[in-house]
Image: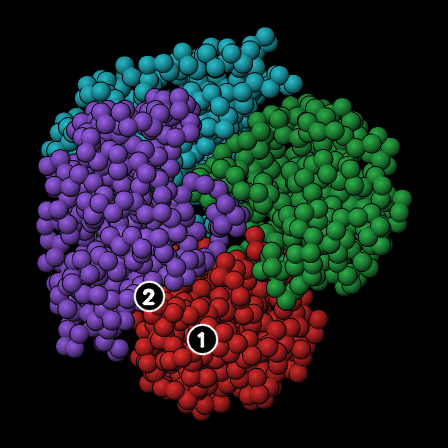
Chain colours: A cyan, B green, C red, D purple
C-alpha cells in the first residue's frame, strides 16, 4: 500500500508517520505540503533523521491520485477544498480535520466560522468513530475522522445513553486536554513560560466539538439532546480526560453501568473498561491507541461520573485514522497500532 | 505579635512562614513540632537559610499558650487533640485542617474516617471563609479555616445561589488541583515520573470537602442541596481551578450574573471578578491571596459555567488563615498579604 | 521616589513591578512603552488587576526625566538609543540589557551583532555586580546591570580566582537556565509541546555573556583568561544553575575553598554559601534575590566543582537592579527584596 | 524465543516489555519477582491491561533456566547473587545493573559500597556497549549492559579519544538526566512538588559511573585517564544529555572532528551524527534507541564541546539490552527496536 499525507508537518501528521513506519502493509509514504516543497523532511524534523529522509512533495491531484489512501491532517477549511476533486479518483480519503464531520452545513458555518465543504461530499462522508460505525467505514471512500474530544466523550457515554441508563437531558461534560491539541504553531497561550504551571479554561460554551458530539449522540442513539461542554488546558503535552455527569435512570446500579460498557466493547481491542479509579489517568494510554473508560455511580445523588481517557494525538487523531484505514482495507484493526502505552 | 505554628514542616506551614516574614505586626514566630524537636529549621529547609535559622520547638501547651495566635497546619485528626486544651488559655487559634469545619460530628466521622473533635469545641469554632463570615471571625477565638477546594467553589457560587440566580438542585462541580495539595509526603501518585505529564481523577464522589461545601451553602444561603463534586490532579505544583455548572433561573441574563458577583465583592480586596475568559487561569493568582471568579451564561442551554481560581496554598490555606488572623486582631485584611501574583 | 520602567511588558519588567510594589520608598511607578501607549496595563496582564491598573505611557525624554530612577528592561540595541540623552537629565539610570556592559565596543559588535552605544556613555556606565562593585555603584548615574548567567557564574568563581585558589587558564562553565530567560516572545523553541520534556543546548560557544564574564574576571581579579562557556535550556520557567570546573592550586583544601567563599560574602545578605550538596537546587532560590554558591574539591583529580544558583529573573535581572537602586539611593540593600524563596 | 525478566516492576523492566511486545522473535515473556508472586502484572500496571495480563512468577533457578534469555533489571547488588548460578544453565544473561561492569572488584566496592560479584563471573562478563564491542557480544553468555550516563558519554567521546583528536588528560563531563533515572521508588527528591520546576546537582564527584567510563576509555582506546564527571537532575521524565569538554589536539579542525564521528558510526543504525546544533535535544530521541552525537570546535579556545543524547530508559537501558540480545542471537540489531522517537 501507498499512503499519502497532506499536512505531514503538523502534530497529527507526525503521529501518522510514527505509526505507519511500523505498519506492515504500508510500503511507501508520500509527504505533501503546500508551502515547503522540496525540503527534506528530516531537515525540518531532525528526530526523523534516517527514518524519513525524503522531500516534501507538491500538493497536486494527479500526484495524490496515485496513492491507495490519502490522509489530510490540516487545519479546518483546507481539506474541504482538496478532497472533493479527489473523491472519485481512486484513493481512500481520511480527513482528520472537522471539514466533513457535520452533516448540517449551517452548523459548520456557525461553529467553525468557515465555508463548508460541498453538500454532496459531506453527505458521502462517513463518521469514523470506529467502534460505532464499522460497517459504514468498511465501504466508505471518504472518512471524517472524529475530533479528539468527541472520541473520548462518545466512547464513554454512548453505551449508557443508548441503553437508557442515564438521562441525557442534563449532560455536563467537563473535558481537559494536553497542549499538543493546540497544534504546532507558537502563540502566547502555548508559550512555555505562560502555559507551564498553569491550568486554564478556553472556548467556554463555544467549542466546535459541541455540535459534533450532539450529532453523534443523535446518530448512534436516536436521542436529540443539548449538551454542556467545556474544555481546559493542562500543562502536559499529550492526553485527554473527559469527565461527564448525568442523572442515572431510577433503579440503575453500578453493576449495570459497568456491565453495559463491558458488553458494548467486549470485542473491541482499543477500548478498555477500567475497574479501579486509581487506574484512570492519561499516562495509562499515552502514546497508544487505547481509550480507557470508567463509570462510577454516586448513590448519594443518583448521578454517574463517566470518564473517557485517550491520547489526543493517537486515538483522538492519527491512531483512529489508521484504525479506520485498516477497516477500509479489510485489515485487522490493530495492524500497525500495537504500541504499548508509555506510562512514563 | 507572637505567632506559633504547629506543623511548620508541611507545605501549609511553609506558606505561613513565607507570608508572615513580611507581616509588619508579627515580631516572633515559634515553630512547633511533634517529632524533630531541636532541629534547626533551615537545616531541614535550606531555602530558608538566613531567614528562619531557629530550632523546632517541643509541642507543649504551656509553650503554645505564650503566643498571641497559634496556627495548626496539620493532617486531619491532629488539631482536634491539641486545640481543646488551648482554647481558653489565651492564643487565638486558627486550624488549617478539617478538624473543626463540620458541625455535624457524624458527618466528620463518615467522611474523614477519624474521631471527631469534642462537640463543644466544634460548636465554638467559626468557619473562616473571610468574605462571608467577617463579623463572626472578628470575635472568634477558634477558626476553622476553609478547605482549599471549598474556598474556590464557595466564593464563586455562593452569590449566585444566595440571590437565586442559579438552581442549586443540580449542581455539578468539577475541580482541578496542582499536586502540592497532596502535601509533602512522597507516594507513588506524587512520584515525579508518574505524576508529571499525566492528568487523573481521584476520590470520585468521596472527597471530604463535599459535606463542607454543602454545609456552607446551607449556612450562607439557607438552601439545602446535595452536590456532585469531583477532584482531579493537574501536573503542576500550585493552583486550583473549580468549574461549576448549574441551570440558570428563567430570564436571568449574563449581565445579572456578573453584576451579582461584582456587587457581592466590591469591597473585598482579594476577590476579583474576571471579565475576559482568556484571563481565567491559575497562573494569574499563583503565589498570591487572590481568588479570581468568572461566570458565563450559555444561552443555548440556559446553564451557567462558574469558575473559581485560587492558589491552593495561599487563599486555599495559609493566606486565608493570615487574612482571618488580621480580622481577629483588627488589622486591615491585606496586612502581610500584598504579594503580587507570580504569573511566570 | 518615582520609578519609571521602559519595557514593562517583558518578563524583566514584570519582575521589577512584583518587587517594587512592596518597596516602601517607591511611591509611584511609570510604565513606558514604544508600542501600546494608552493600553491599561492590567488589561494586558490580568494577573495585575487591582494592582497596576494604569495606562502605558509614551516613551519621551521629558516624561522620563521626571523620575528619580529609570529602569530599561528591553532587548539589546534599545537602551543604547534611549539612555544617552537622559544621562544628565536627572534620573538614575539602570539598564537590564547588555548595551552598556562591554567596555570594548568592538567586542559588543562581534557578540551582539548590533551597533554599540556611544563610547563616552559606555565608559561612564558602572557594572552592577552589587557584591563586587558597591563603591562605584553608589556614585553611578548609569548602571549596566549584569547578565543572568554572569551573575550566577561570577559570584561563585570570582573569590576563588581572586585568591588564586583555582587555575583560571582552563575554566569550563556549563550553565543551565529555565525558559523564562528566552523572554516573552513565542517561538518554536519555546512552544510548550516542544520545549517541555526536553533538555537542549543552545548558542554553543557563541553566547554574548562570554565576553562579559571574561571582562569581569579581568576587572575584579586582574587576570585575563579565555573561558569555555555553554548554555542549556531546562524545561522549567525560572532558575539558573551554573556548574564551573577548574584545576585547584596545589595544596589547596576543601576547607580553604569554602572559607574563601564564606569570608568574601560574610557581610552580603543575598549570597549564601551552601554546606550540603543536597541543598543546591534552583527551587531553593526561586522567586527570591538570593544567590546560593557551593564548592566541592575532587581529591581524585584535584579539580573543583563550583556552583552558582539564582532565579534568573530576580538576582539575574530585576532583583539585582533594585539592589543596585538601593545602593545608589543610600538605602539598605534588602529594601523591597525580602521575599522568601518559594521552594514549592 | 522465550525471554525472562527479573525486576519487571522497575522502569527498566517496563521498557523491556514495551519493546519486546513488538519483537517478532520473542514469543513468550516470563515476569519474575522476589516479592509479589502471583499478582497479575496488569493489576499492578493498569496501562498494560490486555497486553500483559499474566502473573508475576517466583524467582527460581529452575524456572529461569527454561528461558532463552534472561534480563535482570534490578538495583545494584541483586543480580550478582542470582546470575552466578544461572550462567552455565542455558539462558543468555543480560544484566542492566552495574554488578558485572567493573572488572576491578575493589573499585566496585569503593563506588557501589556493596559486595562485588564473584571474580570469575565478572571476568566472564562482556561489556555491552554494542557499537564498540559487537564481536565479543556475539559470543557472550553474560552481558554487562552499560550504564545510562556511560552510554551517552562513551559513544560521543570514544571516537575522538581513540583517534587522538582530543586530549583526554583534562576531560570534563557535565551530564544531565531526566528523573526516571532515579527509578520508581518515591522519595523527597523525586516528589513532584519539590522536583518539578527545579534543577539540581547530585552525587558530586561520587557517581558510580565514573569508574565505568574510565574503564571503558582504557578498554577501547588504551588510554588511562581520570575524568571529572557530574550529574544533574532535570525536571522531565526521560532523557540524558551529556556535555563533554576537552582541549583539541593542535591543528585539528571542525571537519576532522565531525568526519571522525561519521566514519566511526557509518554502519551503526542507532548512532546519528547531528549536523545542526538546533537539533541537539532529548526530545529528538525520546522513546527510541537512538544516540544522537554532536561536536563543535571553539576556535577561540581550541576546545571541543562534545554532546551525547539518549533516552536513558532505552539506549541507556532496555533498548541497548535488546540490541545486545539481538547480536547474541544473530538477529539484525534493529529487530524490535524500530520505534520512531516521540518528539512530542
Asked if residue B38 is positioned above or below residue B235 in the image, the reply reads below
In this rendering, the count of numbered labels is 2
- Which quadrant of the figure has residue C25? bottom right
Depth order, front residue of D170/B134 = D170
Q: In the rendered structure, find residue D228 and report the number of the disc placed on it.
A: 2
Give me the residue at 43% from left, 42% from top.
B193
Callout 2: residue from which chain?
D
* Residue named by callout 1: C253
3D distance between C-alphas at marks 1 and 2: 17 Å
Q: Quadrant of the C terminus of chain A?
A: top left
Asked if residue B175 is positioned above or below residue D224 in the image, the reply reads above
Question: In this image, D246 relative to D49: left or right?
Answer: left
Q: Position of residue C239 (x, y in %)?
A: 48, 61
Give me the residue at 41% from left, 74% from top.
C76
Give me the residue at 53% from left, 84% from top.
C133
Question: In this image, A201 relative to B8: left or right?
Answer: left
Res. D73 in view:
no
Q: Are marks 1 and 2 on the same chain?
A: no
- Which quadrant of the figure has residue D211? bottom left
Depth order, front residue of C223/D76 = D76
Q: Residues within 10 Å of mark 1 (few under 14, many from 20)?
A: some
Q: Residues within 10 Å of mark 2 (few under 14, many from 20)?
A: many
Query: Contact, CB < 8 Å: mark 1 with mark 2?
Result: no
Amino acid at each position: 500500500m501507498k499512503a499519502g499525507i497532506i499536512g505531514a508537518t503538523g502534530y497529527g501528521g507526525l503521529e501518522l508517520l510514527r505509526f505507519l513506519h511500523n505498519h506492515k502493509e504500508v510500503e511507501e509514504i508520500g509527504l505533501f505540503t503546500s508551502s515547503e516543497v522540496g525540503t527534506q523532511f528530516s531537515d525540518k524534523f531532525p528526530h526523523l533523521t534516517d527514518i524519513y529522509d525524503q522531500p516534501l512533495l507538491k500538493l497536486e491531484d494527479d500526484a495524490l491520485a496515485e496513492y491507495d489512501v490519502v490522509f489530510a491532517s490540516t487545519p479546518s477549511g483546507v481539506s474541504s477544498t482538496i478532497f472533493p476533486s479527489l473523491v472519485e479518483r481512486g484513493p481512500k480519503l481520511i480527513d482528520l480535520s472537522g471539514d466533513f464531520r457535520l452533516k448540517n452545513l449551517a452548523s459548520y458555518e456557525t461553529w467553525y466560522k468557515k465555508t463548508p465543504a460541498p453538500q454532496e461530499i459531506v453527505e458521502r462522508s462517513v463518521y469514523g468513530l470506529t467502534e460505532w460505525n464499522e460497517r459504514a467505514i468498511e465501504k466508505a471512500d471518504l472518512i471524517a475522522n472524529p475530533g479528539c474530544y468527541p472520541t473520548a466523550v462518545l466512547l464513554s457515554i454512548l453505551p449508557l445513553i443508548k441503553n437508557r441508563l442515564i438521562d441525557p437531558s442534563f449532560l455536563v461534560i467537563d473535558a481537559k486536554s494536553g497542549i499538543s491539541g493546540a497544534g504546532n504553531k507558537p502563540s502566547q497561550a502555548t508559550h512555555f513560560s505562560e502555559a507551564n504551571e498553569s491550568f486554564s479554561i478556553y472556548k467556554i460554551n463555544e467549542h466546535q466539538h459541541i455540535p459534533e458530539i450532539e450529532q453523534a449522540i443523535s446518530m448512534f442513539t436516536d436521542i436529540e439532546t443539548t449538551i454542556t461542554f467545556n474544555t481546559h488546558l493542562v500543562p502536559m503535552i499529550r492526553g485527554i480526560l473527559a469527565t461527564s455527569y448525568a442523572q442515572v435512570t431510577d433503579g440503575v446500579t453500578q453493576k449495570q453501568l459497568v456491565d453495559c460498557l463491558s458488553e458494548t466493547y467486549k470485542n473491541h481491542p482499543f477500548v478498555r473498561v477500567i475497574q479501579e479509579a486509581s487506574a484512570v489517568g492519561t499516562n495509562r494510554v499515552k502514546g497508544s491507541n487505547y481509550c480507557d473508560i470508567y463509570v462510577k455511580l454516586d448513590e448519594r445523588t443518583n448521578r454517574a461520573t463517566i470518564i473517557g481517557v485517550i491520547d489526543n494525538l493517537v486515538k483522538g487523531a492519527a491512531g483512529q485514522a489508521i484504525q479506520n484505514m485498516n477497516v477500509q482495507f479489510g485489515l485487522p484493526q490493530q495492524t500497525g497500532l500495537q504500541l504499548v502505552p508509555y506510562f512514563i
